Amino acid sequence: MPYSGPPLPPVLVPAPIRALAGDRPLLPVWQNELGGLAFRIGDADGNGNSALFAKWAPAGTGLDLVAEAERMRWAGRFTVVPRVRECGDGAEGSWLVTHGLPGESAVSPRWLADPAGAVRALGAGLRALHEQLPVADCPFSWSVEHRLERARQAGIEVPAELAEQQPPIDRLVVCHGDPCAPNTLLHEDGSWAGHVDLGALGVADRWADLAVAARNTGMNYGRGWEDTLVEAYGIAPDPYRSEFYWRLWNAT
């Protein structure tokens, strides 16, 4: 079964990542279902220099780190996301290096022990992201049509009736695209600190994010937190839109 979470040993460090690290400490921090890896390089030194984070996508996975860098550079003009240092690619894969942000993951031990605080911060942080990113200026799409077409091009069989069941747009926003709890950073006081992993960022109905963020709470904090996240976002639950966009997420 595909695995996403802290890397399982042994972790083989790709040569480009090892070269980027040089003599600085290198720590694997995450792996995704497609074999992509994330590493922390060095530490914040107290002189205004942050740790670096490097993402690695093996060749053939379909992960486009250059496209993610473009989205991060655009979003960084309006909201809190990591600043891109460099990206590149080679025969074995591609990499993206960013500067670290203050705060810690919403699935760190501190926040797993306080699910109520974490879930409220996730909802408020998602609302902040949607409010700060300007739809009219966004050159990227995450619409239903875009996602279904991309799935077809990738050879993914999508239920034919899914496009016909699309609900009317509630509100167009610039969606994160993968608003799961591990992609949100929180300050110690429980306020939202920023978002990471923006490879799918684009314009869509806000429920494309809300449905996934709410359902994902059960995977990280246990059952019963979905409505809390939506209410912290500032709107009422919408079971029909939630179910449709969750099905779309699983299908594509």
Image (cartoon, rainbow, N blue to C red):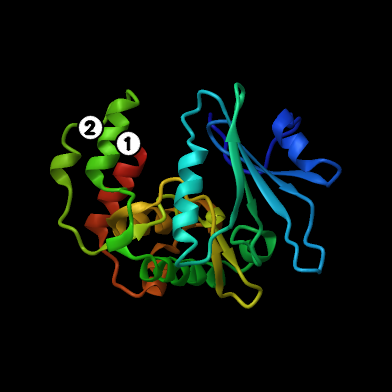
Residue 36 in sight from this viewpoint: no
Secondary structure beneath label 1: helix
Residue 162, image x, y percentages: 20, 39
Of 149 and 186, which appears nearest the observer?
149
Name the residue at the right extreme: 23
Q: For the residue marked with disc 2, what is the amino acid?
A: Pro
Left or right of 40? Residue 61 is left
Residue 237, by quadrant, is bottom left
Left or right of 153? Residue 38 is right
What residue do we see at 82% from left, 63% from top? 45
Quadrant for the C terminus in the image? top left
For the residues marked 1 and 2, what is the alpha-carbon distance in whole angstroms? Answer: 8 Å
Residue 102, image x, y percentages: 66, 67
Of 135 and 167, which appears nearest the observer?
135
Which badge, 1 or 2, comes first in the chain's sequence? Answer: 2
Q: For the residue marked with disc 1, what is the amino acid?
A: Ala
Mark 1–mark 2 contact, CB under 8 Å?
Answer: yes
Residue 221, by quadrant, is bottom right
Return the residue at label 2. Answer: 159
Return the residue at label 1. Answer: 251
What residue do we see at 75% from left, 33% from top? 9
Of 12 and 174, which appears nearest the observer?
174
Residue 235, by quadrant, is bottom left
What residue do we see at 79% from left, 44% from top? 26
Left or right of 98? Residue 47 is right
Q: Is residue 252 above or below residue 176?
A: above
Residue 38, image x, y percentages: 65, 42
Secondary structure beneath label 2: loop
